[in-house]
Each structure stands twice: as structure tokens, then as C-alpha cells.
Amino acid sequence: MKDIVISNDIKYIGADDKDIDLFESQYKVPNGVSYNSYIIIDEKIAIFETIDKRKTEEWLDNLEKALNGRKPDYLIISHLEPDHSYNIETVISKFPNIKLVGNLRTFAFLQQFFEIKDLDKRKVEVKDGDVLDLGKHKLKFIMAPMIHWPEVMMEYEETEKILFSADGFGKFGTLDTDEEWDCEARRYYFNIVGKYSMQVQSILNKAKSMDIKMICPLHGPILKDNLNYYINKYDIWSKYEVECDGIYIACASIHGNTYKACEKLKEILEEKGVKVELSDIAREDMTEVIENCFKYGKIIFASSTHDMEIFSPMRNLLMDLKEKNYQNRKVGIMENGTWAPNSAKCMKEILSSMKNIEIVEPTVTIRSTLKEKDLENLIKLSEEIMK
């Protein structure tokens, strides 16, 4: 991994994981993931997070090099998820005098992961707005509960104006992955953090009063240039606003006939000059599908009927979206069935339980395969969804 430069006194000591198959045992990460950890070298030395067990040795090597013979004074615990906290006991064993810095909830949860017998003597409990003086550098603590665990906090380093943002502004992919930030940051946001967008808005409002020169997240690249771009993206995402013009068609097709009808609808829309993205959700990574459902403001959900219900990939998608507070979208519905099409009714029931979802008519019903007589309804749906 290439050297990550932050500043003379603040060093990157994290590691890339290129061999992981599933992040959090559920998210495909074809370009791996980074576990970010940092250290401030000052009169007092503070380590920001430990690292996942998969990269313990590499992290310890990086830590020793950065310390250059000195001993750390503090371990900042911003987030207790094991990909960041696994080596807390390792650090205590290696540096017996180190203090653990966290908040009330940090220390409530800490004992559920580790049995630290002298925790009361070792802990430094901080609240929102508290400042830890390291010498030249001063850390101001910002409580960020539910982004995306209750104990999460961020730190603003007042001298170099750096925001240590925990999982905020995080992204899938290793640090040496050459790709645009947006796509994998968006997928990370809506699948991991997005349910708690109200809390993200609260943090963004606090950030408005800060002079931020750099953002150091726990996953993904350090953000140094054009910070307003990234903050604006987070503002759009956390308000559930529309990011991209066009229409997204999410299709759950058993034998391919529903998908053929969606291809025809896509053709009709594109002839009208509309940007359209179509996904076969039975085969596509569901986290990518969820990302697209939030990315676009207009969505068409198309599903075969299966056992008088929704075909399971579509049911899973809709239930995932409901769990992630899906809202503020305009949607169209297409169903298919041979003897008793019923998926539209079932889809509408789930969608109607979400906030500010406008379901346009007509609902398009296909009987087994697309016929010439179905085209009129496809055209009507295309016109209504475009309004």
C-alpha cells in the first residue's frame, strides 16, 4: 500500500484488506476494504482506533514505526464494531499504562466485548464538546450516536482542522483502488448508515460551524480536496433527496418474460429521451440495487407473481428498503402472472407503509408474456412516471 500522508504529526497506521470476501458478512467488496487507524505524535500520543483481526500484525508494525520508541498515552475508541476495536486488549497488553478514551456508552458496551479488570482506573470518559489536550494538538469530541451504533463519536482536531469522522464519509474499496468515490461511498452509506440519516443531518449541522480542512474516516480514502463536494453528497443522501435524473427499473423475473416487458418499457422511455437503468434483481448484488433505488427519484418495480405473492427477490428488496427508511420517491408498478397476477397488490401494501411514496397509475399487468395490447398501458405508465 502506498504511503498515506496526513501531516508531520498525524500518521496513517491502517491497512488494506484485499482478500476479504464479504464485509460484515453480507456486503460484497470486489475491491476489498481499508481499516483506517491514525496516530497523533505530540507531547501526549493518541492512537485512533485499533484494527480488524485480519490485519493485526500489519497494524502493529505500522504502530511501532510511528511510535519510534515512544509509548502512547491514549487510545481513542470512536466506534466499538470489531473491525475497529478487535485489538483493544492487544494494545493494553503491549502498553499497560495507556488510557482508553470513550463516552458513557462506549464503556457500557466495552465490557461486553472484553473483560478489562482495571477499566475504572484506565478510562477517560468524555462528553459532547469536551477537549483532550495533547500539547500542540487538541481534540474536541462530537457525539454521533447511531452513525451507526449508539456509542459512535467523532473528533475534531482544532490545530490542523481535521475531522476524524468514524464511519461517516466511509467507502468500500482499498486505499489503492483507482475508482470514483461516489458509487462505493453511496452503496456504503445507504446499506450501512442510511437508516440513521436524521442523525447524519444533526452532525452535518454541527459541521457547518467547523473549519474543516481534511476528513479522516474509518474506511476509504482521506478526503482533502473539494470537501464541499463530499459534504453536499452526504446532505443529499441524508435528506433522502434525488441525486440523479432518470428512471430506475428494478425487475424480479422468474423465467424472463417480466424482464422482456421491462426491456420494452425501457425502450419506450429512452425513445422519449429519458435516461433509464434496468436491473435483473434476482441476479444483481442487492446492495447495488438498494443504492440505485436511493440514487434515482423515479423507480419502477416489476415482479412476477409467485405463490400468490411477490417473487422473493422483489419482496426482499422492498423489505430492505422499508428497513432503511426509503422515502420521497415516485414509483410505478408492473406485475406478471399466468392464472392470478397478485404481486402488484402485495408490492403496493409494502410501499404504502413507507413515507411519501407516490404510486402512479396505471399499474401494468402482464399475463405470462407481453402482448401488443399491453403496449398502451406501458406507454401510459411511461408518461405518468415522467411527469
Image (cartoon, rainbow, N blue to C red):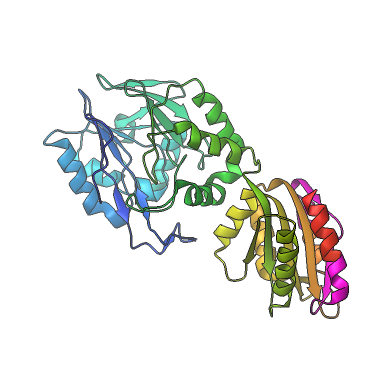
Left or right: where 58 falls relative to 140: left
Q: Is residue 69 left or right of residue 356?
A: left
Residue 376 locus on image (x, y percent): 87, 66
Q: Residue 170, relative to residue 30: is it above or below?
A: above
Q: Please name the residue shown 80% across and 48% down the image.
A: 387
- Specify start and end residues of the magenta stretch as a single range: 349-376
Q: Is residue 119 left or right of residue 151?
A: left
Please, is residue 126 above or below residue 232 in the view? Answer: above
Using the rendered image of the protein, determine whether residue 345 is visible from the camera's viewpoint: no
Q: Is residue 244 visible?
A: yes
**Image quadrant where residue 9 sits:** top left
* Residue situated in front as seen by the camera: 78 or 344: 344
Percent coordinates x, y for residue 106 in the rendering: 43, 37
Q: Is residue 355 magenta?
A: yes
Residue 137 in the magenta stretch? The answer is no
Q: Residue at x 16, y 42 (%)?
A: 64
Residue at image location 80% in from the left, 79% down from the top:
368
